[in-house]
Image: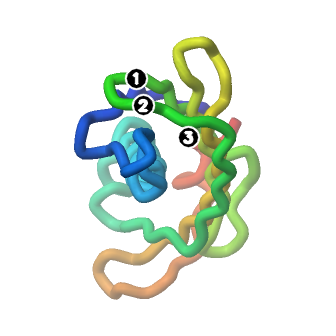
Amino acid sequence: MSFKRDFVAAHDDIDELGHVNNAVWVRWIQDIAVAHWDAVAAPAHRAAVVWVVTRHEIDYRGNVTEGARVTGTTWVPNAPKGARFDRHVSFVDASGRTVVEAVTTWAMIDRATGRLMRVRPDIAAPFLD
């Protein structure tokens, strides 16, 4: 199941080249992933586990300037492998052009123990396309 969220480039998001800083894209990738989790996960799952990023792979295909709006879409195309899964994220500008694409790897941590735990099918099911 994919999830969408809009982002608007604020003044503080802009670097010396006049476009959204790479660190901001990483923050937006995390923000949309967390928003997707909060919107879809069962309350018991949100209380029991926490997710951490273990890897980002990001392709920058265009620039976004101050005040511009982009729409982020995220999805999980494949079942988890053990404690980890890959989340895809794409950002498109107002013209529909993809400006950033990413694949991020997330790991699930048991909130009570702080240890990695295998992603159970019931936790993954609401996110799989």
Q: Picture coordinates of residue 56 (x, y %)?
A: 60, 64
Q: Say which of marks 1 and 2 sits in front.
A: 2
Q: Picture coordinates of residue 108 (x, y %)?
A: 49, 70
Mark 1 = which residue?
68
Q: Are marks 2 and 3 in contact (CB under 8 Å)?
A: no
Secondary-structure class at tag 3: helix
Secondary-structure class at tag 1: loop
Mark 1: give few (<14), some (14-19) or many (20+) Cα within 10 Å. some
Give the Cα distance between marks 1 and 2: 6 Å
Give the Cα distance between marks 2 and 3: 34 Å
Mark 3: give few (<14), some (14-19) or many (20+) Cα within 10 Å. some
At x 57%, y 33%, the residue is 91
Q: Quadrant of the image for the C terminus?
A: top right
Q: Which mark is residue 24?
A: none
Above or below 121: residue 55: below
Above or below 61: residue 120: below
At x 75%, y 51%, the residue is 78
Q: Picture coordinates of residue 106 (x, y %)?
A: 55, 66
Q: Say which of marks 3 and 1 sits in front.
A: 1
Amino acid type, residue under disc 2 in the picture: Thr
Camera-nearest residue between 116 and 12: 12
Q: Is residue 37 visible?
A: no
Q: Earlier in the sequence, mark 3 or mark 1?
A: 1
Q: Picture coordinates of residue 67 (x, y %)?
A: 32, 24
Amino acid type, residue under disc 3 in the picture: Pro
Q: Are marks 3 and 1 in contact (CB under 8 Å)?
A: no
Mark 2 = which residue?
65
Q: Quadrant of the image for the N terminus?
A: top right
Q: Which mark is residue 126?
A: 3
Q: Is residue 28 visible?
A: yes
